[in-house]
Amino acid sequence: MIGMGVSVVAFVVVVGIIAILNAIRVVREYERLVVFRLGRLVGERGPGLVLLFPLIDRAVKVGLRTVTMDVPPQDIITKDNVTVKVNAVVYFRVIDAKQAVVQVENYLYATSQIAQTTLRSILGQAELDELLSDREKQNQALQQVIDRQTEPWGVKVTTVEVKNVDLPQEMQRAIARQAEAERERRAKVINAEGEYQAAQRLAEAAAIIGREPAALQLRYLQTLAEIATENNSTTIFPVPVDFLRAFMTSMEKRPGA
C-alpha cells in the first residue's frame, strides 16, 4: 500500500510539473499569443513571460514579422487579348493577431489565394504595353486591392511586385520586329534632320556669297591652300582675269582704300 501511495504521489507530481511547464510560455518580441479560455477569446499576450491556466487556456502563436510570399505564375489574358504568364511577390505582416486568428482559418493560405485571384483580375484589365512598361502603376493597384481585402483579417499588405511577364514566342518575335522598325525610323529621322541642317547652312552660305562676291574668291584661295598642304606635288591653277578684277573691285570698295 505504501508503494502504491508513493507511485500515486509521484504520478501527481509529474503531471503537476508538466502542467506547470505547459502553463509557462516565453513569447519573443516578434510574436504574440492569442489566448482562449474555455473557448472564449481572452486577449493577446506577450512579449515576455506568459502564464496560462492549465487545461483551461489554449494559446495560438502568431508571428508579426513581414512575410515574403511568392505568387505562382498565373495565366492572364490582357485587355488586347494576349495570353501571358505573370508571377509576383507579396510582402505582408500581421498587425492584429486576434483578428488573424479569429476572422480567418489560415491567414497565410487565404492571403495567397487572394493574391492569385487579384493578380488575374487586375492585370487582365491592362493592355500588354501597359503591363510591360508601367509596372509601378500595376504594382500599386495590386497592393491596394489585396490590402483592402485582407484588412478585416488584421493583415497589412505593404508591397506587391510583379516579377516576370512571360510572352509567347510569336509575341516576342513581333515585339522584336517592332523595336527594330522603331530604331530604323529614328535613324532615318536623325539622318533627315542632319541633311536638313546641312542644306540650311549651305543656303545661308550661298546667300552670304551672293551678297559678297569676294567671299567666293577667298574660299577659292583657301581651297588652294588646303590642296597645297595635303599634297606634296606641285599644283598649278590658272587664275582668271575676272577673279583678279572682282577681288580688286572688292578691295577698292572698302573704306580707306
Image (cartoon, helix red, strand yellow):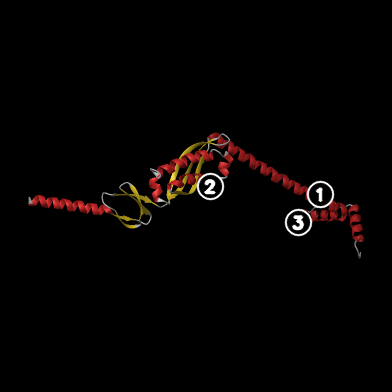
Q: Where is residue 213 in the image (x, y as percent from the top left)?
A: 87, 54
Where does label 1 land, which residue?
203
Q: Is residue 159 left or right of residue 63?
A: right
Name the quadrant of the C terminus. Answer: bottom right
Where does label 2 land, which residue?
140
Tag 2 near tag 1, CB within 8 Å: no
Is residue 154 or residue 108 the one in the foreground? Answer: 154
Label 1 sits on what residue type? Ala
Element carrying mark 2: helix
The alpha-carbon separation of the residues under discs 2 and 1 comes to 55 Å
Tag 2 near tag 3, CB within 8 Å: no
Q: Is residue 5 left or right of residue 242?
A: left
Residue 218, visible in the rendered structure: yes
Mark 1 or mark 3, which is nearer to you? 1
Question: Quick one: label 2 or label 3, which is nearer the N terminus?
Answer: 2
The alpha-carbon separation of the residues under discs 1 and 3 comes to 28 Å
Element carrying mark 3: helix
Q: Where is residue 114 in the image (x, y as percent from the top left)?
A: 46, 41
Q: Quadrant of residue 50?
A: bottom left
Task: Name the residue furthest left.
Answer: 1
Is residue 26 or residue 179 the one in the foreground? Answer: 26
Label 2 sits on what residue type? Gln
- In percent of the image, x 78 and y 47: which residue is there? 199
Where does label 3 land, which residue?
229
